[in-house]
Amino acid sequence: MRLPEGLARFNRHVTNPVQRLWAGRLPGFAIIEHTGRRSGRGYRTPVNAFPVEGGFALLLTYGPDRDWLKNLRAAGGGQIEYRGHTVPVIAGEPVRTESADFLPNLPATIARRLRIEYALLLTTC
């Protein structure tokens, strides 16, 4: 189940600016740094991130059709700020959570309980 688009718009304009103040430093949160594919402008998008072997797992709570993901893939990658460190990453293809064998137990349980359909693996460079 994908969260409503209205909530995504609210988060983009209200919640995300507040989360950008701390999301890159607290466990379970990160900031994706990406470049706009049309504007060329830099963006910082807060996400929930879980460290995994070789990178980070993200639950795509609003589905795979997000601008930050399109930007990240169009640019061939970007950066993630996690617990105060920034590392370059490359985004894989979004996969259905039931076949996302890279998900640790906690995000897999969250995905199941909230019926989140897609996950993403960000590979560190």
Image (cartoon, rainbow, N blue to C red):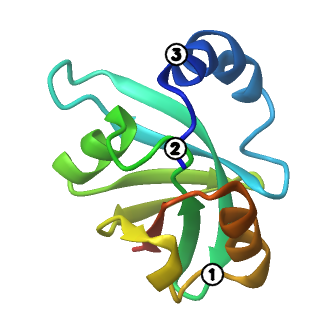
Callout 1 amino acid: Val
Badge 3: residue crowd in 10 Å (few <14, some 14–19, many ≥20) = few
- Foreground mark, 2 or 3, reads 2
Q: Is mark 2 on a helix, strand or loop?
A: loop
Q: Is mark 3 on a helix, strand or loop?
A: helix
Residue sitting at x 54%, y 28%: 4
Where is residue 57? Give x, y as percent: 57, 69
Where is residue 86? Give x, y as percent: 59, 54
Q: Mark 2 points at which residue?
A: 2
- With respect to residue 27, does 12 lie above or below? above
- Foreground mark, 3 or 1, reads 3
Gap in Å between the C-alphas at discs 3 and 1? Answer: 29 Å
Residue sitting at x 74%, y 28%: 19
Callout 2 amino acid: Arg
Residue sitting at x 60%, y 21%: 7
- Residue 88 is left or right of residue 109, and the answer is left
- With respect to residue 9, does 2 lie above or below? below
Q: Which of marks 2 and 3 is nearer the N terminus?
A: 2
Residue sitting at x 56%, y 47%: 61
Q: Name the residue under label 3.
A: 9
Badge 1: residue crowd in 10 Å (few <14, some 14–19, many ≥20) = some
Q: Quadrant location of residue 53?
A: bottom right
Gap in Å between the C-alphas at discs 2 and 3? Answer: 14 Å
Where is residue 51? Give x, y as percent: 67, 74
Where is residue 116? Give x, y as percent: 58, 57
Say if mark 3 contacts mark 1, CB within 8 Å: no
Badge 2: residue crowd in 10 Å (few <14, some 14–19, many ≥20) = some
- Residue 119 is left or right of residue 107, and the answer is left
Q: Name the residue under label 1.
A: 52
Return the residue nearer the eye: 112 or 68.
112
Q: Quadrant location of residue 110?
A: bottom right
Callout 3 amino acid: Arg
